Image (spheres, rainbow, N blue to C red):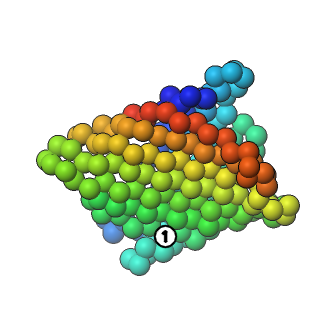
Amino acid sequence: MPGTERLFIDAQYLKFFDQNKHWSLFSRSRATAEYDRQQTDVFTGAYLNYTTASGFGGTVLGRISNTTSGVDVGLHFFKANKAFMIYALPAINIGDELAYSWFSILRYTPRLSTQWKIYTSLELFSAFNEAGHAASVQRIRAGADRQGWQFGLAINLGQVGGDFENINTNPGLFIQRVF
């Protein structure tokens, strides 16, 4: 996603390990390259999930970034069909300091024709520690899907700490491929 403030690159992978789709691995690696500061932030996370037929289950998350690393555990909710997907994960950090987070992805992709779909996506992430709100990110995408190629308008929003008046925005365009 080339935006007005930075370039955002995100690779996501979802693999089910059994035919009932109970065990899965969701992983993502992303990088953000700032145009003006010549700084790149990176993150890689792997979410090992066990999901029951109801959609609820447990998650163990391993994560590494250029500023921190750790292991989180949480309870998730996952449901998907051809046009809708929701993944929601409240998690707590396993470490010396209290830290907890909420991560969710909502996608709606209704079919318009045999080759075209509408593509909408909302990703939310908020992290908290003993001092309160640590950071939040919202990634919004709206566009079209043609045979697995998705493109359209995008905006990434971010807040650090309790200063909600200082929201970092990065509007732009997105293009992605689903394999």
**Residue 176 visible:** no
Query: Looking at this view, is 100 or 25 the one in front?
Result: 100
Amino acid type of the residue tagged 1 in the rendering: Phe
From the viewer's perspective, tell me whether residue 143 is left or right of residue 61.
left
Q: Quadrant of residue 32?
A: top right
Task: Identify the secondary structure beneath mark 1.
Answer: strand
In the rendering, at what x and y percent does residue 40 appear? Answer: 67, 28
In front: 136, or 85?
Answer: 136
Q: Residue at x 30, y 42 (%)?
A: 144
Looking at the picture, does residue 2 appear above or below residue 161? above
* Quarter in which the C terminus is drawn: top left
Task: Locate residue 39, reporting x and y percent.
Answer: 70, 25
Q: Residue furthest front?
A: 165
- For the point 38% across and 77% down, the residue is 53
Residue at (73% x, 52% y) in the render: 164
Residue in the image at 43% along x and 51% along y: 121
For mark 1, what is the residue?
77
The one nearer the camera, 90 or 144, is 144
Quadrant of residue 132 in the image?
Answer: bottom right
Q: Position of residue 62 (x, y in %)?
A: 64, 53
* Most distant residue in the left direction: 114
Q: Residues within 10 Å of mark 1 (few under 14, many from 20)?
A: some
Q: Is residue 51 left or right of residue 157?
A: left
Q: In this rendering, is residue 168 above or below 131?
A: above
Residue 145 left/right relative to 26: left
